[in-house]
Amino acid sequence: MLVDSHCHLDNEQFNPDRDAVIQRALEAGIDRMLAIGTGEGPPDLEAGIRLADRHAAIYATVGVHPHDAAKTDAEVFRRLAEVLKHPKVVALGEIGLDYHYDFSPRDVQRDVFIEQMRIAADARKPIVIHTREAWEDTLALIERHWKPTGLPGIMHCFSGGPQEAERSIALGFYLSFGGILTFPKSVDVQQAARAAPPDRILVETDAPYLAPVPKRGKRNEPAFVVETARKLAALRRETLENVAEETTRNFEQLIK
C-alpha cells in the first residue's frame, strides 16, 4: 500500500472523471490520498474537505497558497483556524513562498506564511511547504517561526539538492518526492533521495501536475505515484515494497 501525500483532486481537470480517478488509485494500491485544500484561494477554504467528506480514503489540508496570499485578510485567517479543526484535516498547507511567479507581492507572501505557521502551531498541526526559487527565505522563516514549536512538516514536491534536504530534515521536515524525481535531469533531487533517512521520506503526485516517467506529459493522477515510488526504490537500492512500507509509516507518524 502507498500514500499519495499531495494531490489536487479538486482541480477542474478531474471534473469529467474524478470518481474514476480515485477508484483507479485504490485499485493500484494507493489506500490514502491527501487532498490539498488551497483550491482557487480565498474565500473558498474547503476544497479538500469536500473531497474528504465524500471519500473514506481521502484526507485533507486547508491553507492559502503563496499565489493567493494577496487575497487574505483577518477574516480568512479566522476561518482558517476554524476549518483546521475538521476531523479529516491533518495539516495546514500548502503554504510558503513562490518567487518564480510572484502572483502576490513577496512581502505579503512572507506575512501570510508567518501567520499561517502561527495558526498551525496553535492547532498543533503540521504544515505543508511550497517553495520555488525561495529556499533561503523559506528556510529562514521556518527556522525562526516553526522550529521552536517542535512540530513536523512536509517539503512538498522536494526540488532541492542534498544541502536543502539536510537543512529541511534538521528543521523536522519530511521530504516528499514527486514526479520530478523520475526526470533524467533531476540529478540534485535524486542525490537527496538516495541520502535521505528512511524515516523522513514520502511520495506524492501533485496531480494533475508533473506526471512521472513513463507517464510524463499526461495528466497526473494518484495511481501514478507507484512510478515515483519505484524510482525512489531504485535510487535507494531498496524494494518497492520496502519503500511503500517506509513512506506509509512516515505518513502515519506525521498525521497521528
Image: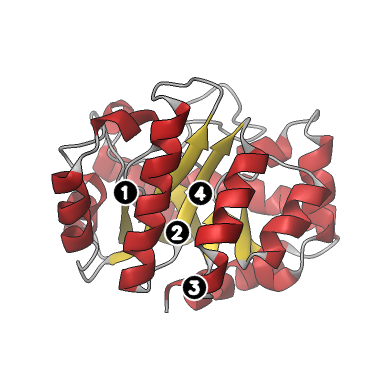
Q: Is residue 249 above or below residue 81?
A: below
Query: Residue 126 or 225: which is nearer the viewer?
Result: 126
Q: Based on the displayed image, in which of its 4 quarters is residue 187 positioned?
A: top right
Residue position marked by numbered label 1 in the rendering: 63
- Residue 214 in sight: yes
Residue 254, percent from left and from top: 50, 72
Task: Kindly identify the amino acid type of the residue bearing the numbered disc 1.
Answer: Gly
Q: What's the distance in space between the residues labelled 3 and 2, CA to CA?
A: 12 Å
- Disc 4 vs disc 2: Cβ atoms closer than 8 Å? yes
Q: What's the distance in space between the residues labelled 3 and 1, CA to CA?
A: 19 Å
**Closer mark to the observer between disc 3 and disc 1:** 3
Residue 38, percent from left and from top: 31, 42
Q: Is residue 252 above or below residue 145?
A: below
- Disc 2 vs disc 1: Cβ atoms closer than 8 Å? yes
Residue at image position (66%, 62%) is 201
**Closer mark to the observer between disc 3 and disc 2:** 3
Residue position marked by numbered label 4 in the rendering: 129
